[in-house]
Amino acid sequence: MNPHQQPAPTCFRHPDRVTGLGCTRCGRPACPECLTPAAVGQQCVECVRQGRNETRQVRNVGGAVASNHPQPYVTYGLIALNLIVFAITAVQARTAMDMNSRNSELFYDWVLVPVAVGEGEWWRVLGSGFLHYGLIHVAVNMFALYVLGPYAEIALGRGRFVAVYFASLLGGSAAITALSEPLSASAGASGAIFGLFGAVAVIMLRTKQNMTQILVLLVINLIITFSVPNISIWAHLGGLLAGTVATAGILYLPRWLHAGTPKAAALIGWGAVAAVVVIALAVTVFGAPSLPTVVNTLFNV
């Protein structure tokens, strides 16, 4: 053993027990005996006790009950941003239905067309993730983000949640750019949403929670992906892969590499997310078709 290597983390109540688990509220390492399943992740016995005490503190003059629980503001911000972009396209197109994709200048400029990306319009890779084909499309995606986002944001922390979300979005765009028809048009937050499905599954696996519900939801959504026409299969699969790998890098890679300190573990986690982003961008750059190639293919030149 390297004499300079930091010892493996041990339970804060049982120093003789090595553990890779921790409280999702205070972050202290704890063994399974000292952790209690919570609405998000697992909490140590002291945080559970503190939470109960805070719940009893009610103000007498009609004031709200104080709460120290983190709020998923990033999730709400992403929902707001998606709705704002949708509203702009609807105003430009003068309709909130799927015709907004045909008569909106913003939609035309941002929709993900692989050949356009190959011609240098790289902003479509990111911007397309905030466009939606009509009211039903945006409503379904924003409901999924509302359900999955808070869980992942509180468990991962705001910074890492944002990183996983955009890594998933880029992963979905990369798969579309490299594997879809060159002249196809794709839009929607579903790549990022599927990345959150993967993220939540990894979080639940890491905290040893019952994964039945999330797996059933994921399977149902995959069945819909492959059975309903006009759904971008590559966006869903690319986003799912990117979000799953990025979250696994955050929660598992530091343990596998025997990170000795919380700072080292954080650096490894961020490095894993950065690697996913770099790979997604590389796939986009090298997989994006160019217009001359498409023309030659279409006309057998």
Image (cartoon, rainbow, N blue to C red):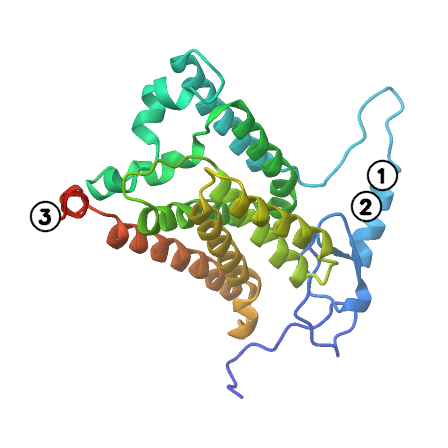
Q: Residues within 10 Å of mark 2 (few under 14, many from 20)?
A: some
Q: Nearer the viewer, residue 181 or 281?
A: 181
Q: Nearer the viewer, mark 3 or mark 2?
A: 3
107 lies left or right of 300? right
The dot on residue 76 is: none
Residue 116 position by quadrant: top left
Residue underneath mark 3? 301
Residue type, mark 1 in image: Thr
Q: Position of residue 225 (x, y in %)?
A: 53, 45
Q: Residues within 10 Å of mark 1 (few under 14, many from 20)?
A: few
- Residue at 66 percent across and 62 percent down: it is 205
The residue lying at 74 percent from left, 75 percent from top is: 15
Which quarter of the rendering shows the N terminus? bottom right
For the residue marked with disc 3, what is the amino acid?
Val
Secondary structure type for disc 1: helix
Location of residue 107 in the rendering, given as x and y in whole percent from the top left corner: 36, 25
At x 29%, y 42%, the residue is 114
Tell me the distance, in whole angstroms, between the alpha carbons under discs 3 and 2: 70 Å
**Crowdedness near tag 3: few (<14), some (14–19) or many (≥20) residues, C-alpha within 10 Å:** few
Left or right: residue 269 compared with residue 285: right
- Side of 187 where 40 appears, left or right: right
The residue under label 1 is 55
Of 73 and 225, which appears nearest the observer? Answer: 225
Check the image and name the residue furthest to the top: 94
**Disc 2 element:** helix
Asked if the residue under mark 2 is in contact with the one under mark 1, i.e. CB atoms within 8 Å, the reply is yes
View extreme (front): residue: 300
Q: Residue at the location (57% across, 62% down)?
A: 251
Residue that label 2 marks: 51
